Amino acid sequence: MSDAAFEGLIIRGGSALGLPLPSTGYARQAYGNVTPDFGPARWLSINADGAVTVYAGKVEYGQGIRWGLAMATAEELGLDPATVRVVLGDTAETPWDIGTFGSQSTRFTGVQVRRAAATAREALDLAVTMLDLPTQDLACESGRVSSKSDPGRSLNFAALLAGLYVVCDITDDVTLNPPGEFTVLGTTTNRLDALERVTGRAVYSQDVTRSGMVYARVLRPPTYAATLVRANDSIAKQMPGVAMVVVDDDLVAVLAETDQQADAAFNLLTAEWSERGDHPSHWELPALLAEGARDPVVTQEAGDIEAALARAAHRLEATYYVPYISVVPMEPRAAVAEWVGDSLTVWAGTQRPFGTRGELAQACGVDESQVRVIAPEIGGGFGGKSIYRPAIEAARLARLARRPVRVAYTRAEEMTYTTFRPAALITIRSGFDGDGRITAWDYHAIHTTTDRPMIGQRGSETPYASDHVRAVVSAGPAPLRPGSYRSLGCAVNHFGREVHIDEIASRLGIDPVELRLRNLADPRYRRVLEVAAEQFGWRTATAPSGQGVGVEIGLDVGSYAAECVAIDVQGKEIIVNRVSSAVDCGLIYNPEGVRAQMEGAISMGLGSALFEATEFEGGRLLNASFARYRVPRINQAPPSKSRSSAATRIHRPVQASRGLSLSLRQ
Amino acid sequence: MRGHLIYFAAMTNLHINGEPRQAPEANRNLLSYLRFDLGLTGTKYGCGEGLCGSCTVLVDGQALRSCLATVGSVGGGAITTIEGLAEGEVLHPVQQAFVAESAMQCGYCIPGFIMSAVALLGRVPNPDVGQVREALSEHMCRCGAYPRIERAVLRAGGASNE
């Protein structure tokens, strides 16, 4: 956009970085190659025709942030959210952003978007002179600034901005609409980008094509850690439609005019590999973790744990194993790269467009300013698409081919050459009295870890009050590359802890909800547990009914949650009949978005609880296909309740100063 | 079920979303043909093995996994893709129901679910919950929009939504 030609209003501000950078922060540890750009960037514009556009470097992979950010903008400007255009994840168009992970889009970006929109609202006070009215008599509503006392006197945004070019910086003291006066935020709306999604018009990275583009198939090693000795392309390069066979160091690929021609030639590509024979198999992993623990980090410590254990009335020690699981987004990764001179544009469904831009610049030996990354719609990410190798493969191939290149993973590639939810071995030693009060808690988790030690630390602290606590997280060997997956190590740590709490309850014959409440001090934690149990109608089942109930609580990135589950056991199959869930995630912008997130989390959680596990042997994945890797289907989800009869209630948490909690029932 | 292994050099005549088309290669994969030759990218690749349902289209009203079909195997058939469901700007009732229930997250699987739901409602105009779950159990939604998808299909089927 040429500023000289632009008429209208632009609101600028710094990055809405929610996570601490640099050096010691989580994000820096996680993605060390990011180069933050905190400089002022355009967050919002109002064109001369009155159209409002908001810009954010986050990406949309189903969580509904386009919807939420449109509501945030609409709230401050008094608009219908459907009229707000939201531009996301384009390094040439949006403010710098660290990446879409860690539940930051509402908590941090959402606030910055509101501040940008509120700054715009204040800037529109230039109507003061045009309408000859005092500031306090102005109201901003439905794309117009009008007089509160005389609604007949008003101007629309277009009339206000005609012939003007105004740039404002977001001010620190800009006034946001208070939660008590919200008219858009907190209300139930339908998803704003639903139309594109039900008509097939939404464009994902798998759908991007460019004029003159060739289709690539990249040769993959037969086993993990195998290295290429030599590739034989003599037959492949003579196949119909083949534009080129690239053998560039470790990157071997067929480029052809159609996807099918690429597949056909790829099948005739042969190679000699040097394979490592010592790759562990999945059934060896628990022992491997126990033996290979290193770099222990204390995440919580109080009192004298050994003395407290020694004098405890009851003691329990148990070890829990959580396998690797596969991320399985429905859209396998894809990228299209196009060079024009020394400038590169890559369309890639990455969760870190700016991080991917840096990696592309590094891999191609160009400056970041020469690289543009555009994230189209993303068909599921769950954290996993923070690592996005096909972008780099496509860029390297496109430079050699001098044509745009598309690299699209097959399902098997997606499930093999990406990252996995870390596996972990968790040992807990607890001491408790006869009333179920925990007097000692010694927690040690060993998570599969490569370059990101914080993977296993999240959520390792116990919320159950005890004067004597120690939580230690160690790094363990990682035969498969671990990566983000829905709250990273947190869900894994919570699993071990909550199962252990149930074992204490079982040992003492105390109700598991009651036992948790006896040990929980945090009022927000207590509240979600009480609400979930109450709406569930919590009552333990008795053997041998073949029925059971379960409860679990959790806290991650500022959100408290509790779930109660009712199951039927039929042979070896566990049927989940009912899930009751309560969440307190602070201030809720978009209640329908929160409900959708909780429903989705329940579905994914059931998969990891009931049957998901990644299996591997001799450096090969054994279940990199839907024929062998089972994920929850609609007939395994708990029967849905209709919206009207569901016990969906919104609660004010006991003590959270600004917030609502929401509970839902499936 | 039409045979999948039909190889011949002649053009294959198809009707896609009401328009006559001539596909030059009978052994062209139907999903690739729709997506890359015709630009109908609403039909998605999910697994290439017919196991996830993302590539579902209708052939003469029946749901078909396009990733496992060739153009020749559906020659002469009337093919409907997600792009062909709406009448101009008026959405098909199943599409309307998915919008009304916000029945999607990332949305990648949704065209496939919608096509199978349309096929189901063609066979069973007022399906109950069990029939909806059974018919859609061959589809995958990793985001877990299942409760909403179920409600949307029941709504489109005119069920009382109890």
Image (cartoon, rainbow, N blue to C red):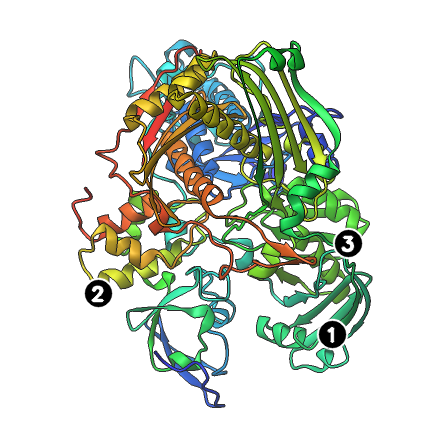
Q: Chain of mark 3?
A: A
Residue carrying label 1: A270
The residue sitting at 52% across, 40% down in the picture is: A87
Q: Pinpoint residue A664: horizontal percent, then vertical percent.
A: 33, 30
Mark 2: few, some, or many residues within 10 Å (few <14, many ≥20)? few
Q: Amino acid at mark 1?
A: Thr
Q: Tag 1's secondary structure?
A: strand
Residue carrying label 2: B123
User: Looking at the image, is A308 positioned above or below residue A285?
Assistant: above
Instruction: Give the mark count.
Output: 3
Q: Quadrant of the C terminus of chain A?
A: top left
Q: Pinpoint residue A564: horizontal percent, then vertical percent.
A: 37, 30
The residue sitting at 47% across, 83% down in the picture is: B26
Marks 1 and 2 sit apart, C-alpha to C-alpha, by 48 Å
Q: Classify residue A462 as left or right of residue A510.
A: right
Q: Are marks 3 and 2 on the same chain?
A: no
Q: Quadrant of the N terminus of chain A?
A: top right
Mark 3: few, some, or many residues within 10 Å (few <14, many ≥20)? few
Q: Chain of mark 2?
A: B
Q: Amino acid at mark 3?
A: Asp
